[in-house]
Image (tube, helix red, strand yellow):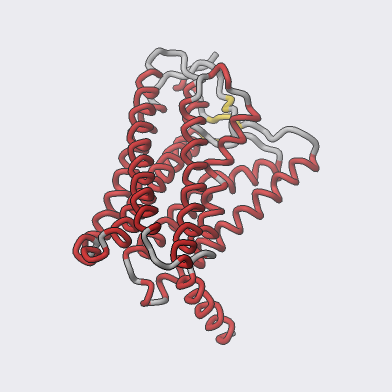
Amino acid sequence: MSNSSSITHFLLLPFPGTRQLQLLHFCLFLATYLAALLGNSLIIATIAWDHHLHTPMYFFLLNLSLIDIGYISTTVPNSMVNSLWGIRDISYASCAAQVFFVLFFISGELFLLTIMAYDRYIAICRSLHYGTLLGSRACAQLAAAAWASAGLNALLHTASTFSLPLCQGNAVHQFFCETPQLLRLSCSTAYLREVWLIVASACLLFVCFVFIVVSYVQIFRAVLRMPSEQGRHKAFATCLPHLAVLSLFISTGFFAYLKPPSISSPPLDVLMAVLYSVVPPAVNPLIYSLRNQELKAALRKVTTGWFQKQ
């Protein structure tokens, strides 16, 4: 047994199997990470370069891409290094930083997706008031509120988690430092304080999810009244993938943080972690760019101009 004052490092969950399976995990994570970096970086560069995309929708999309790059960079590179070199150690400070940034980017992603749903609702259902309700100043304030709220939420959870006495060893059954796994190492009922914080945050995030769903319901009702069948098809083809990825992100995240310990197992925990921390940052660029003709046209201009300069 050890207490938190004597713990200097944690041991992350090693990916089991032969050396070949560990290398396969490394290659899959590397491919996913590079795809996420490339996709999100292209979106950021395109929106920053093309002045026609300096609108509220693309401003929020740029922020989402920044969050996605930070989110996947918090966990995946470290896991790849561990698989490649067969190591498990992570320092106490690095573990705390990982917890903070994971929670920061999770919260920021959902807050920003909520704002983006509000943006689409105003654009489609209250288009005459769009310029008034979402001017440049309002957009900057909404984005700043999302980043600040995410930072405050992450700070509260990180401080609460790492103030707990730990006496159940230092083995974290996850490929990164995840709050629910760290709580299992606690030897005090004080961990209930962090559990209540998680429940409170989950309720807030659930309210965001409900707001997003209600916004999309209003959008769908407006779309169904469109006279153009092509316009309806385009709107549904754009919105439904958004909701699908969001539902995957929310459901797996809720399950990972709120499931009872009795149904927990390392393979299930790892699968849920991959689905809420690795898949969304890699898929979001495809969802938000490939189905957006304006963004695709601007992206072609950027890449064509870049190749012509070479």
In the rendered structure, the answer to whether residue 16 lies left or right of residue 249 reads right
Residue with the most extreme left position? 132
User: As rendered, which of 62 and 221 lies closer to the eye?
Assistant: 221
> Could you tell me which quadrant the C terminus lies in?
bottom right
Judge by depth and name the residue closer to the eye, 177 or 150. 150
Task: Depth check: give the residue in front, 170 or 101.
Answer: 101
Q: Is residue 120 visible?
A: yes
The reply to whether residue 136 is in sight is: no
Asked whether, in this view, residue 82 is left or right of residue 233, the answer is right
Expressed as whole percent of the image width and height from the top left, the position of residue 204 reads 33, 35
Q: Nearer the viewer, residue 27 or 170?
A: 27
Question: Residue 298 at x, y = what percent?
Answer: 47, 76
In-image side of 83 versus 124 (left or right): right
In the rendered picture of this protein, how many numbered marks are placed on residues?
Answer: 0
Against 309, residue 46 (above or below) is: above
Q: Residue at x 55, y 13 (%)?
A: 1
The location of residue 75, given as percent across then percent down, is 54, 44
Instruction: From this view, report whether residue 254 is shown above or below residue 76.
Output: above
Image point (39%, 59%), residue name: 223
| Residue at the spot 61% in from the left edge and 58% down from the top edge | 34
Whether residue 47 is situated above or below residue 71 in the rendered picture: below
Image location of residue 300, percent across then percent down: 53, 77
Q: Which residue is found at the position 52% from the left and 59% from the top?
A: 285
